[in-house]
Amino acid sequence: MALKGIIMRAEQQRTRRLLWPRAAAAIVAVTATLLAPPAEAAAGVLIDETFTAQTNPANFGFPAGAAVTGGVLNVTKGMGDHTTAVKTFGAAVAGERTLDLTFDWKTAVTGSGHRSGVELRDSQGNLVFALAGTPAELRYGLTGPASGSTSAPDSLSPVWTKLSYDRAKWYSVNLHLDFTLQRVQYLISTKETAAKVMVSGTASVAGKDLAKLVACNYLGTGVQSIDNFRVVAPANAANGRLKGRTMYAFGDSIVAGHTYSRGFVDLVAEREQMTLNKYAVNGASVGPSGNQILTQVRGAASRAPDRVVFNGGTNDAELIYGNRFKVGTMAGGFDPATFDKSTYAGSLETTVHAMRAKWPTTRIVYVAVHKLGSRDWNTQLAIRAVTLRICEKWGITVADVFGGTTLDTRVDGQRVAYTFNGQVNGYPGTGGTGTHPNLAGVTAFYLPVLTGALIQP
C-alpha cells in the first residue's frame, strides 16, 4: 500500500504538470528536484587572504614574529624557544558551527631537533588541529592538552603523528570543521600539479569553535610561511542533522572508490557520523549487463535506511556508445510491465521501482557524476536528459555534481589534478583517465553537493 500511495501521488503530480505549457514544464520539472549548485556565492566566504599585499590588520593580526613579504605570510621569525604569537579570529568565524578551512604551508626549519608549527584552537584553548615541521618530519595533531597559547612548552604540545616529508616543498591543508559534532576531516597534500596526499582522515576533537591561529616556535629556529588562507561557511552544512542516520549506497566504481576503499559516500558518512552500508562495485551499470546495480539493490538488507544514495550511467555510457544497448525513453506510467528493460531508461525505472518497493519511505538520492573526459560527450548528455526526467517523475533528489559544479575532466588540467587510477603513498594519486575522483576532487566537489542533497527538506 505504501508504494501504491507513492505512485498515486506521483501520478497526480505528473498529471497536474501536463496542464502547464510544455516549455515551462520542461524547465521547472528538471530544476525542481535538482540541488542548487554549491557555488561559493551561496556560501559565506569569511576569510580569503592571498598575502599579495599587506593585510588589515597588519601581518594578519599577529603581534610578533610575522611579516607579509614576497606574497606570503612569514611567522615565528626571530622567536625564542617555547614562544607563541596569536592571531584571534573575529565573531563571524568563531560563531560558525561548520567551516571549511584551507591554507598552504612551508617551513624553513633546519637545525637538528628544531621544531615549529601552527595550532588552531578554540575560545577555551582546546585543540582543533595542529601542523608542525622538523628537519625530517611533518607532524600533525588533533588531540592534546588545552592551552592558553601564552607559551608553547613541551607539556602543552599536541599529540603528534609523524610523517616523512620533503622539507623543501609547500604543503596544502584542507580541513572540514564541524563544531556541532566536534569532528575534523583533514587532508594534507603536497602543493604541486601531481599532488601527493600525505594523510587523510576524520577525527573527534575537543575544540568547540575556531577562535585562534597560533604560531608556535617550539624549539630552536625556523620561519614558517603561510599562503592562500581561506575560511568558508559551507552553503549546505549538515550541522549534526545526519548524525546516527543510516545510508545505503549503490552504484559503480565512483561510489565504490575504485582502487581506494574510501569513496565520496564513505567520507560523507565519516564526517557526519552516519552508518554506511556500501554495496557498489566496480564496473556496475544501470542498463542490461552482467553487473547491474539492480542486483545490488535486490541483495541489500531489507531494513529501511534513512537515505539511499546511488549513481549510474558511467559504464552505461561506454556500453551505449559501443551499441550494447540503447538509451531508450521514460515509460508513460509506473507499471513495471511497461518498462523496456532492454534499454538504459527502462532499467533505471526498474531499479528505482525496486528501491521504492523495498524502502517506500526512504529518501533516495541520485548522484549525477561530474563531466567525464573519458566518455563520449553526446552519450553523456543523452543519459543525463532521460535520467533527470525519470528522477523528477519518481521524486528522486538529484545531487548534481555534473550541473552544479565546475568539475569537468574534459579539461586536461582538471583530469590531472582531480582524478586517479592507482594509489601513491596509500592514497589516490593524480593524472587519472578523468573518471575516478581523487580525494581533492571528492572534497572540493562531491562532498558539498551530496551533503546538501541529504539534508534537503
Image (spheres, rainbow, N blue to C red):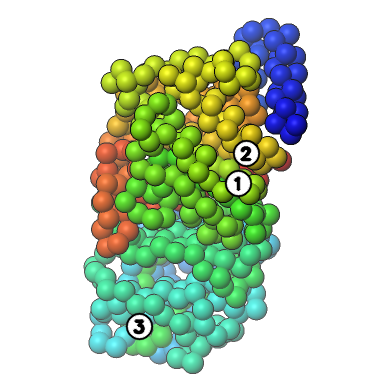
Per the image, label 1 sits on a secondary structure element best described as loop
Per the image, label 3 sits on a secondary structure element best described as strand
Q: Residue at x 53, y 46 (%)?
A: 300
Which residue matches tag 3?
Answer: 115
Q: CA distance from mark 1 to mark 3?
A: 54 Å
Above or below — where is 28 with respect to 209?
above
Examine the rendering and report whether any part of residue 299 can be seen. Answer: yes
- Tell me which numbered mark, 1 or 3, is placed earlier along the sequence: 3
Q: Are marks 2 and 1 in contact (CB under 8 Å)?
A: yes
Give the mark toward the camera: 3 or 2: 2
Which residue matches tag 2?
Answer: 358
Which residue matches tag 1?
Answer: 302
Q: CA distance from mark 2 to mark 1?
A: 7 Å
- Tell me which numbered mark, 2 or 1, is placed earlier along the sequence: 1
- The amino acid sitting under disc 3 is Arg
Q: CA distance from mark 3 to mark 2?
A: 57 Å
Above or below — where is 11 with respect to 231?
above
Circle 2 packing at 10 Å, graded few (<14), some (14-19), many (20+), is some
- The amino acid sitting under disc 1 is Ser
Per the image, label 2 sits on a secondary structure element best described as helix
Describe residue 318's horizontal placement relative to residue 231 as left or right: left
- Give me the disc on residue 419: none
For the residue pair 177 and 152, the one nearer the viewer reads as 177
